[in-house]
Image (cartoon, rainbow, N blue to C red):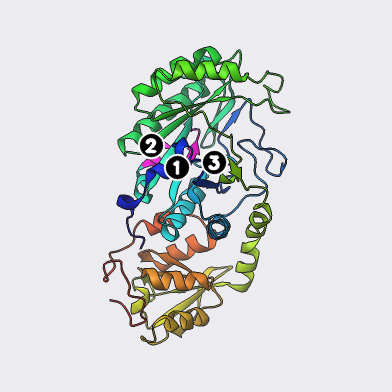
Amino acid sequence: MTKQTTSVVDYRRHPCFNPKVKGKCGRVHLPVAPACNIQCNYCNRKYDCVNESRPGVTSTVLTPEQALFYMGKVLEKEPRITVAGIAGPGDPFANADKTLETMQLIRRDFPHILLCLASNGLNLETHVPELAEIGVSHVTVTVNAVDPQISENIYAWVRDGSRVYHGLQGAELLLDRQLGSIKALKKFGITVKINTIVIPGINDHHVMDVAAAMKKLGVDLLNCMAMLPNKDTVFENVTEPGKAEMAALRNQAEQYLPQMRHCTRCRADAVGLLNEDRTEEMRSCLSSCSRLPAYTEAKRPYVAVATQEGVLVNQHLGEAIRFQIWQQDNEGFSLVEERPAPPPGRGGQRWLNMSRILEDCRAVIVSDIGDAPQAALQKMGLRAVIMSGFIEEGLKAVYSGKGIAGLQGRMRKCTTKGVCAGDGGGCG
């Protein structure tokens, strides 16, 4: 179980929210959210457009597990990274399962890293309590207007579930959801930045109204961003606002909210310091990480389960004297065999022996696990999924990659108070 680290996390280390640290603290964007639930008239998301640096662009998309592995590689190359964020290439909450699982995994294995999200706000509000529980500290919401009669000209459509809205109806729905999301974020003490895309002839006259409305909601920072004309979009022929025009808007808006003036309009796979970007350098690593599951699934077809009676996940890793080995088949799931766990003792060697016993398993499902064995198993490519409940529920989550974050939110209290000595002596 990940320990709560809120009291020791320095929130000033976020370079987007604190320009004083932009030269010594960096960020990495994890591109795990490909789907989007709105269509902006200025947005053209080309995943493989490596020569462009703008929001919505990435060279590849990762799964949550790939993102976790990539995070480790990034920190090896650039230890000044202090923030892990998800900014697309779609919207994090059009991909809520992937987003939440990624945040859970990063929080678990890199507790010192700040967690950050950027969303259009349509499907954000219902997930705010879980974001707070995970420890997401900074969220950006793009609000381009607080008058639906203006924003209906900005969005081609808004999709809520299976229903698609157009025109004023879609704009009203989006604004209502955005305002509710911002209120919820502030209720849970999360720092909120608003991005407002300035579009000449559409909303440039309306920026002060946005700033005033956001101030009333308790927003912390406003980022007025000049629209970049993109080919094959409705606004491709709209002229980008000039630097002088943007400076004047920011100066006026500053009477309501502090302004972000150092935004670099990052890609969805950006990595490095804001003024020392290393996205191009890390592209081959990102691409390699995106191919990891094929190897994992082929070489590790099974899942190990720590269980007393074969129905429920109800044993701490250190308590288990045997593991049930399960596989996915045409009928659903079937029990392959039982394997004995290595005997207690021998310190870290026990966890090495365990990883060898379970070397053909992609995950081990347990009711809890200490930090030291969890780290040891992960180094050997064996993921620990912490949950309580029916075995089948855990198997479905592991094999589908969906819903794991929800299961891990229901973990029981560890009998070792969340701390394992890691001496191989057994827990419980």
Residue type, mark 1 in image: His
Question: In the rendered structure, are the residues bearing label 2 and label 1 in contact, judged by CB atoms less than 8 Å apart?
Answer: yes
Mark 2 crowdedness (10 Å alpha carbons): few <14, some 14-19, many ≥20:
many
Q: Which residue is label 2 attached to?
A: 191
Residue type, mark 3 in image: Ala
Mark 3 or 1: in front is: 1
Q: Is residue 183 magenta?
A: no
- Give the distance between the C-alpha atoms of the residues marked 2 and 1, in whole angstroms: 11 Å
Q: Is residue 68 visible?
A: yes
Q: Earlier in the sequence, mark 3 or mark 1?
A: 1
Mark 3 or 2: in front is: 2
- In the structure shown, which secondary structural element does the residue marked by tag 3 occupy? loop
Residue 124: quadrant of the picture:
top left
- Give the distance between the C-alpha atoms of the residues marked 3 and 1, in whole angstroms: 15 Å
Q: Earlier in the sequence, mark 2 or mark 1?
A: 1
Residue type, mark 2 in image: Thr
Q: Which residue is label 1 attached to?
A: 14
